[in-house]
Image (cartoon, rainbow, N blue to C red):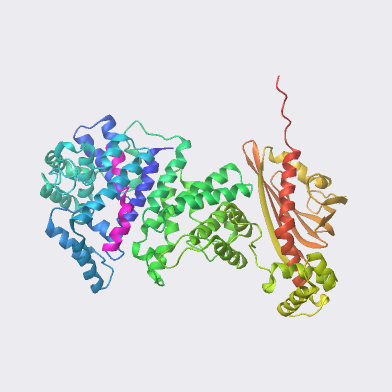
Amino acid sequence: MRLAELLGALSLATDLAHGVPAGTALKDAVMSVAFGRHIGLTGQDLSDVYYLALVTQLGCTSFAQEQGEVALGDDQSMRRAFSDADYTDRGEMLRLAATELASHSAPYDRVRAFGRFLGAGRGFLLAGNSAVCEASARLGERLGVGTNVSRALNEMFARWDGRLFPHPAGDGVSLISRLTHLIRVAQIHSRAGGSYGAADVVRKRRGGEFDPSLADAFLECCGDLFAGLTEDSVWDQAMEVEPPPMRLLPQSRLEEVTLAIADFTDIKSPFTLGHSRRVADLAATAGSAMGLNTRDVSVLRLGGHVHDLGGVSVPQRVWSKAGKLNRPELDAIQLHTYHTERILSASRALQPIGAQAGLHHERLDGSGYHRGVPAAIQGEVARLLAVAEVFQSLQEARSWRPAVTPVDASKVLAGEVSAGRLDRAAARAVMEAAGQPAGPRTVPWPVGLTDREVEVLRLLAAGRSNRTIAQALSVAEATIRTHALNIYGKTGVHSRAGIGQEEIDMSEIRKSVTIDATAAELFDIVDDPTNFPKYVPNVTGVEDVTSCKGRIGDTFRVIYKVLGVSFDEQFTTTEYERAKRITSSFKGGMTGAFRWTFEPYGEQCKVSVQIDYGVAGGLLGKAADLMMLEHANAKSIEGMLENLRRMVVKPVAPAN
């Protein structure tokens, strides 16, 4: 992995957190390298200047909560206004506080923000310096910027004259820190006044904030430095000017990088500390339980770390608001997934992770954001990440609500699944990964039936009397009468026949597993219906096998039992692509489709099964169908995939 790409991508996030144009830090890097060469820097020093310029604002989120409290939630305007200020110039500080703080608020609130700033005093500036410098240095070290750059990040507010902040003066501050600090301030001032504005601020602060020798050297080449900025892609230019040798990080350190990004993101608010780590762990555990391959589980974990990176763009007033959000505030929230994906797409190492992380607020019915894509666009990784994010967030307090218990979070997931917004299989996997028992339902029973009422309903529909039902369930007969009355009241029917007559209701199971075998080898087993009894639990026979040219239209019968009930299904092949996918429709006791897909991963293959099916019989069928989904069919599919794995296990050669 190229270090410059990783740091460059993260610099886009720090630009976003400051509310400055994208590419601001990249321009700092380009100009810092050019200026470094102008004053004779080479080798390690020039490289350190480059990396330092990219990550100078790395700790900016660490003091966002405190800045928001002073600026009435507008932490972004405070960072933007004061990032280039002369903190020893009282007149300039008062002017910036009066004109920039809470600039989008009502006049009364702006006056309040100004008053809070005055009341915060020097201690506020010193606390901010300490928090930002410490966070920057620690994050930089974790990202692999090196000892010199990490040390310089601790000096980012240091002045040549040593005033105000507790840093050394003069040459006691590292040269790379003095140089990048000057370039950063000059570049900010150039946005309003061009190179003349940049030269003017450097001239005024020479000998105070800035090293006088560096200030003089800058004034000599100021015009050339700004002229050297390309009008095309500043990203490409910033990557091109990286001083040799290009620094690379091993792929094994990618998780360290994403963990650093997680902490950079989450320290912005006390409500989100550790949130991204918890989402990542939950999503990855659920992915493993669902049988995802190693690569997908890794993407889940890393995607969980970085999923909220774009949230640094949202002002604290939005995250801390207790009431209903207005339209601009909602827009800011809904754009954070776009910013996450955009930032991470800049790095080749992070782009695949960002593509999934950017989908974590999408919903299966297309009601999510930022794209509003339908279910077909959302794969297993995106669906799991979305569910894990919801489940984890519910258990964390927010400004507008308290944290809820895991049980209550499970109920919310059930409602979202029932409404068609979240994936059923992903919800079950996440809840089980979180230690919730499999019993709590991911889908509610029809018309509000309870678990016990469904058990009674099935037995009533089978013609059992209240007495025999009571004996079967080990309860009093009076209890069964009460359940029966509740069932008839909820369903609106009053007989076994009435319960049993209605339409077919469809449900779905999806499972995956990664197997040490080729796609062709596994496909050949599945392609032969006579193999069914070898790996499909409860199958007692396969009969009447016929084949067609091209394989579309092949038919066969499968006889099997589920929950003690025998089924005889007629299967017909409707889709066939060798070693890739095969789909068969079926009808009989149940109706639906059985889909296999095979995805090669090196010497392994990810095998996925999706079954859409239904049982005839209205409320009875629907209840029985869901019962089987929860307690029998899902387990049968898991057993089928495990048996398939065992069929292709290579025997271990005996040791010599």
- Name which quarter of the figure residue 618 lies in: bottom right
Q: Is residue 76 visible?
A: no
The total of numbered circles placed on residues is: 0
**Considering only vertical position in the picture, is 351 above or below 497?**
above
Residue 601: image location, x then y, percent = 62, 40
The outermost residue toward the front is 476
Residue at the location (74% across, 74% down)? 483
- Name which quarter of the figure residue 612 lies in: bottom right
- Name which quarter of the figure residue 336 lies in: bottom left
Q: Quadrant of the N terminus?
A: top left
Whether residue 9 sits left or right of residue 255 in the image: it is: left
Residue 463: image location, x then y, percent = 85, 71
Residue 184: image location, x then y, percent = 23, 47
Provide the residue span drawn in magenta.
49-70
The outermost residue toward the top is 656
Whether residue 72 sits left or right of residue 337 in the image: it is: left
Front residue of 184/577: it is: 184
